[in-house]
Image: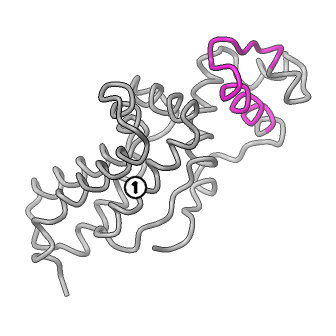
Amino acid sequence: MGGVVPEADLAPELSSTQTAILTAYSELIEEVGTDDVSFRLIAVRAGVGERTIFRYYPARVDLLLATSAWIERTIFTRQESESIFDVPLAIREAMEAYDRRPELAHVVAETALRGVNGAEPAPRRDRFDTMVRGEVPALAEHERRLLVAALCHLDSAATWVTMRRELGMAGRDIADAAMWAAEAQLDPIRDRAAG
């Protein structure tokens, strides 16, 4: 595996004030949840006035979406996989990270499930597609699309939340299941990988 993905470099530049606001809101989400956090409380924690928050984020949903995208970029940073066949381990590590910060994982998942998180719903789709094209060029177009979609789905906070809430799984079991599911997607094409 390579270094940390410089996703912050790909995101719009945030001012120090915006960063303070998003940091404060993230901390408060972990402490009291999303419903009980007022703009006043965020302002006090961030060391800014309430009007400053409204200047950047006119509605609560704007703040929530920006915070979700920021959490994904800064708190749930990812290791860049060198090979598509390394992705299952990266997915396992992501699931473990979500388990360490469950309140924030829920925020990321819920905004992504609503389709409005201010970011690409599958931010690693293009990277996965590029890796598959390069490593398994013989893979048919429809097979490649299905594989990339499956890996993107497994590599998400939504998968962690679903396994936790709907199936009642423990953190380690979620990480194992997601990794194994990704391996199951990749196993059939290993023998077709180039060189």
25 left or right, relative to 71: right
Q: Residue at x 70, y 16 (%)?
A: 58
Closer-to-camera residue (132/42): 42
Decide whether residue 130 is among the magenta residues. Answer: no
Residue ranking furthest to the bottom: 195
Q: Mark 1 points at which residue?
A: 92
Amino acid type, residue under disc 1 in the picture: Arg
Quadrant of res 129: bottom left
Q: What stretch is highlighted in magenta?
A: 20-41
Residue 114, given in percent of the width and then of the height, sits at 40, 23
119 above or below 126?
A: above
Residue 159 image-quadrant placement: top left
Give the residue displayed 35% in from the left and 29% down from the top.
168
Quarter of the view holding residue 52: top right
In which quadrant of the rendered image does the N terminus lie?
A: bottom left
- Crowdedness of circle 1 by 10 Å Cα count: few (<14), some, many (20+)? many
Q: Residue at left 38%, top 26%?
A: 165
Residue 35 percent coordinates (x, y): 63, 12
Q: Looking at the image, which is closer to me, 121 or 34?
A: 34
